[in-house]
Image (tube, helix red, strand yellow):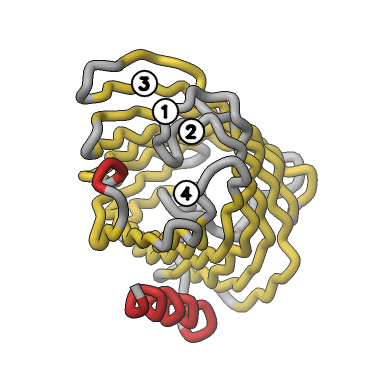
């Protein structure tokens, strides 16, 4: 566990040492780049997760709005499907999420920009108590973090560091995400781009002293106002309970900006 904690610290240092970022929004990670004031984004990112206890699907409707060019508010309404190996299965409303972001730093250059935002994600206990983290727990979670990224027309990186508080469960989590992006086509307007993404998630569950490192490989196609994307995520390290271990996740997403 001590080595894994050092790994998280070293990855965090990349926030200050890497000078690059990606075109297009990451798939499983986040980015600080925002659209213009008054913009709406309708999106979904369905996760199909296979674990040691069963298969779970989370299909959220995400509605994002930018009151200003440096702020964003959103609501995520998830439909959850669950199929436990012991026979329990069904569909239900998952844990509703409320998202807010505020960009407090921006430095632009020729064909590049560096930005930092504060972020909070409030997860309401509207779902069934399935005990599946990130899908449906039936517990309140309050996440507070900072997202930083440097984006150019060639390639890029996004970083996110935050802490998730769950007063009614033992899922308090120190979380660090690191995402690299690689555009495959020249930058043009209107947008027509194919992006490859290489994304990592470090989760240290502080109450249980457990650790998980996930890696996601994704591809994204953006044209005009529409984006479609897909990724597969699998664990690299899991020092967690056997009942909570993941096998893999598949992500399928779309988004429309207007």
Per the image, label 4 sits on a secondary structure element best described as: loop
Foreground of the two, 209 or 34 = 209
Foreground of the two, 53 or 36 = 53
Who's the residue at 29% across and 17% down the image?
A: 88
User: Earlier along the polypeptide chain: callout 1 or callout 2?
Assistant: 1
Residue 41 figure quarter: top right
Identify the residue position indicated by label 3 in the image.
81
Label 1 and label 2: CA atoms lie apart by 5 Å
Q: Picture coordinates of residue 10 (x, y %)?
A: 42, 82
CB atoms of marks 1 and 2 within 8 Å: yes
CB atoms of marks 2 and 4 within 8 Å: no
Label 4 and label 3: CA atoms lie apart by 35 Å
Per the image, label 3 sits on a secondary structure element best described as: strand
Mark in front: 3 vs 1? 1
Q: Along the horizontal axis of the image, is 137 left or right of 49?
A: right
In the picture, the quarter occupied by the N terminus is bottom left
User: Earlier along the polypeptide chain: callout 2 or callout 3?
Assistant: 3
Mark in front: 2 vs 4? 2
Q: Picture coordinates of residue 253 (x, y %)?
A: 39, 36
Residue 91 figure quarter: top left
Who's the residue at 47% across and 49% down the image?
A: 191
Identify the residue position indicated by label 2 in the image.
137
Identify the residue position indicated by label 1 in the image.
130
The tag on residue 191 is 4
Per the image, label 1 sits on a secondary structure element best described as: loop
CB atoms of marks 2 and 3 within 8 Å: no
Q: Picture coordinates of residue 172 (x, y %)?
A: 53, 54
Who's the residue at 35% across and 55% down the image?
A: 195
Compared with 194, 32 (above or below) is below
């Amino acid at each position: 566990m001590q080595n894994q904690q050092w790994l998280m610290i070293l990855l965090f240092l990349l926030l200050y040492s890497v000078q690059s970022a990606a075109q297009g929004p990451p798939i499983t990670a986040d980015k600080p780049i925002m659209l213009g004031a008054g913009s709406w984004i309708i999106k979904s990112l369905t996760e199909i997760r296979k674990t040691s206890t069963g298969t779970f699907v989370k299909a959220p409707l995400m509605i994002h709005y930018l009151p200003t060019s440096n702020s964003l508010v959103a609501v995520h309404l998830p439909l959850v499907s669950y199929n436990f190996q012991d026979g329990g299965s069904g569909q239900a409303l998952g844990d509703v999420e409320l998202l807010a972001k505020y960009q407090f730093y921006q430095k632009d250059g020729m064909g590049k920009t560096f930005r930092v935002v504060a972020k909070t994600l409030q997860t309401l206990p509207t779902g069934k108590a399935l005990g599946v983290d990130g899908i449906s727990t039936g517990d309140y979670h309050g996440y507070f973090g900072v997202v930083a990224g440097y984006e150019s027309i060639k390639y890029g990186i996004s970083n996110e560091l935050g802490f998730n508080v769950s007063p009614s469960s033992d899922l308090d989590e120190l979380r660090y995400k690191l995402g690299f992006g690689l555009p495959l086509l020249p930058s043009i307007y209107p947008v027509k781009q194919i992006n490859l993404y290489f994304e990592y998630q470090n989760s240290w569950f502080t109450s249980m002293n457990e650790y998980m490192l996930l890696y996601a490989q994704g591809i994204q196609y953006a044209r005009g106002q529409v984006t479609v994307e897909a990724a597969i995520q699998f664990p690299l390290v899991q020092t967690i309970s056997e009942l909570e271990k993941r096998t893999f996740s598949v992500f399928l997403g779309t988004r429309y900006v207007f």
